[in-house]
Image (cartoon, helix red, strand yellow):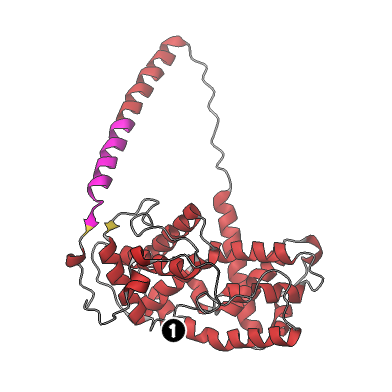
Amino acid sequence: MSSSCSDSNVLCNEDNIEILPGKSPELYSSDIDSSPSTLRSSEEEESIAGFIEDERNFVTRSDYLSMFRSRSLDDSARKESVAWILKVQAYYGFQPLTAYLSVNYMGRFLNSRQLPQTNGWPLQLLSVACLSLAAKMEEPMVPSLLDLQVEGPKYIFEPTTIQRMELLVLGVLDWRLRSTTPFSFLGFFARKLDSAGTFTGSLISRATQIILSNVEEASFLAYWPSCIAATAILCAANEIPNWSLVKPEHAESWCDGLRKEKIIGCYQLMQELAIDNNKRKLPKVLPQLRVTTESPIRSSVSSSSSSFSSSISFSLSYKRRRINSNRFCVDGDKENFQ
């Protein structure tokens, strides 16, 4: 890919990244702070109205979700990529917003540009590039492009390859990285529900966890950030005994632009996924076997266990060699996304 951007190194050359002394609103995504707002109520309402108006510019088109439902895009591959992004976010302690933006960039890119179907590495390269761009937008300290590739990726890419992919992503997104996300609304919606401020911090923290835990699920692409934020706050409130009767319909009045039917649909989806996740976390109860035989059988069992352990050890070492043999550096001259 040929680049005509003379200043491309500002975003894509890791050696030139500078740590800014403080967050500037011109360089970081605009989010309502979780602390008590110093804005007057009318100003805050105006800010939220601006986010509502702007959020349509940072979501995927409706046909993007249908591409997963029709299996023209691989949902399992998307989930694997998002899971890797979340692992790296946890590994480095990145902000939740960084992980969400990475997924947002990836979705908007795939909604506009098709990747080559080649052994899965193009999607992983896209994941690394999107995470790198999001980290450069939101994090005060960003690992090198090689250090960013942790938590067991199948392929390792050269920095120059990732930088080229970053430029391609920037071009497809029209350099619009300051996205409106569900985190833009959490503080405002929490204060709508908790005007006294008693549980506001807890609501925001729990809602943030709920949003990240559901970001792998493609079905949420049907809902805009404001709807996801309102639903996450509702789900968080339902975990507080005194607010267990708060219903999705209550959120429609929080601001203009929220639609009751969308909130109810998103709320039901979150509840269903929460139930499924809880079922998967339940411990499996294994049947207990009582051994009543004497030492000759015990000796035989011990011998069989030793043989089985040796077999397992050999199998694991063989698989490890196979995995390591598939992990290679992709040279920048071998990719072509034109």
Residue 128 image offset from top left, x and y in percent: 36, 63
Would you say residue 72 is visible in this rendering? no
Q: How many marks?
A: 1
Which image quadrant: the N terminus?
bottom left
Magenta range: 312-329
Residue 241 image offset from top left, x and y in percent: 79, 60
Main secondary structure along the magenta-highlighted residues: helix
Residue 49 sits in which quadrant? bottom right
**Residue in the picture at 48% in, 81% down:** 58
Nearer to the camera, 127 or 296: 127
For label 1, the crowd category at 10 Å Cα-Cα, with few meaning under 14, some 14 to 19 and many 20 or more, is some
Q: Amino acid at mark 1?
A: Arg
Would you say residue 87 is visible in this rendering? yes
Nearer to the camera, 45 or 52: 45
- Magenta includes 55? no
Secondary structure of the residue carrying tag 1 is: loop
Nearer to the camera, 126 or 299: 126
Q: Residue furthest top?
A: 295
Q: Residue furthest front?
A: 21
**Residue in the picture at 38% in, 79% down:** 111
- Magenta includes 320? yes
User: Disc 1 marks which residue?
Assistant: 61
